[in-house]
Image (cartoon, rainbow, N blue to C red):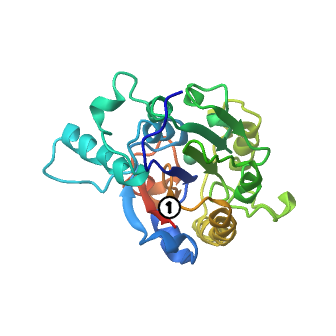
Amino acid sequence: MSAPPDGARNFVLLILDSCRFDSLVAARPRTISRLGEIQRRFSYATWTAPSHYNLLMGLLPHPAPTNVFASAWYQRDLARFEERLGITGLGFEALLPRLWLPTYLRSIGYKTRALVSMPVLNPSTPLAADFDSYESMARHNDLAAMIPRLRFSDDHPTFTLLNTGETHYPYAPPDEPESQWPRIHGVHGVFKRLGAGQLVHASEAPRFFNQDRLDQLRRRQILSIDAVDAAVEMLFDALPANTWVTITSDHGELFGEGGYFGHGPIPHRKVLEVPLVEGLLR
Ligand SMILES: [Zn+2]
């Protein structure tokens, strides 16, 4: 393992699964906002697996730049990691040929670690490639439970990917009993099956939507952010000084817009709209 470049710092990438941009803004999270303003960005993908693949290539949600070639944007956006990591020389060419941020970071002396909550990100998937450690959490919605599992060292910087699902359906804080989770006909069975790592069948899809119920679910997503923000405060306390933290989401969530609920096979702008907040913890 090579010696890390002077000044290289820890980097934490926290993904609030399914969190809409406007949900995070409406929640007015005190601790998350300490990092900076909540920026409106767009995910490259509409659901968890391809979105995380893209994030781990080093391409974070974009601001929908106009009058720029995609390749020029990738180069400019990857160069932003120089500030995040406190290093120089990061760009498209540095990532070749694998185009995988964990591979590159290991090559310059980082440890790479991941704690994930969604079954489609489990350690058997290709997403776990070139992580020194990659674990699935026992529960889908407990960011606070990840904190004792974090590992840092004075000898090398660490890249940590965290994926947490308080903001994913059913938008439940970790202390809410499962018996109180909302039940939408069809959707709950789909969620249960996903939890068991099984495929979803079309026959299980919800058959109709009631906008009042969807509005309630949207309020639940906003309220779930209170628990996330409290856990982020514990996270900040646990992180070493001089750690760069980026908080974003992998995709948004539809609550009835255009006749859609959730995310995935949905070509709607709102499913791409996500928040991004980042900054250096001193
Ligand atoms: Zn997701």
Q: Residue furthest left?
A: 67
Q: Can you say which quadrant of the picture contains the N terminus?
A: top right
Residue picked out by circle 1: 20
Q: Residue furthest top?
A: 97
Residue visible at 53% across and 50% down?
10
Q: Amino acid at mark 1?
A: Arg
Residue 262 visible, this angle: no
Horizontal side of 269 relative to 164 (left or right) equals left
Q: Is residue 101 above or below residue 237?
A: above
Residue visible at 52% across and 48% down?
263
| Few, some or many residues within 10 Å of mark 1 (<14, 14–19, 20+) | many
Q: Position of residue 9 (x, y in %)?
A: 49, 51
Number of numbered callouts drawn: 1
Residue visible at 33% across and 51% down?
80
Q: Position of residue 101 (x, y in %)?
A: 44, 35
Horizontal side of 97 relative to 55 (left or right) equals left
Residue visible at 61% across and 48% down?
154
Q: Position of residue 152 (x, y in %)?
A: 65, 48
Q: Secondary structure at mark 1?
A: loop
Residue 254 visible, this angle: yes
In this rendered view, identify the residue nearer to me: 160 or 121: 160
- Quarter of the rendering containing residue 126: top right
In this rendered view, identify the residue nearer to me: 39 or 278: 278
Residue behind label 1 places its C-beta within 8 angstroms of ligand 1? no
- Quarter of the rendering containing residue 88: top left
In this rendered view, identify the residue nearer to me: 258 or 89: 89
- Quarter of the rendering containing residue 269: bottom left
Q: Position of residue 15 (x, y in %)?
A: 55, 52
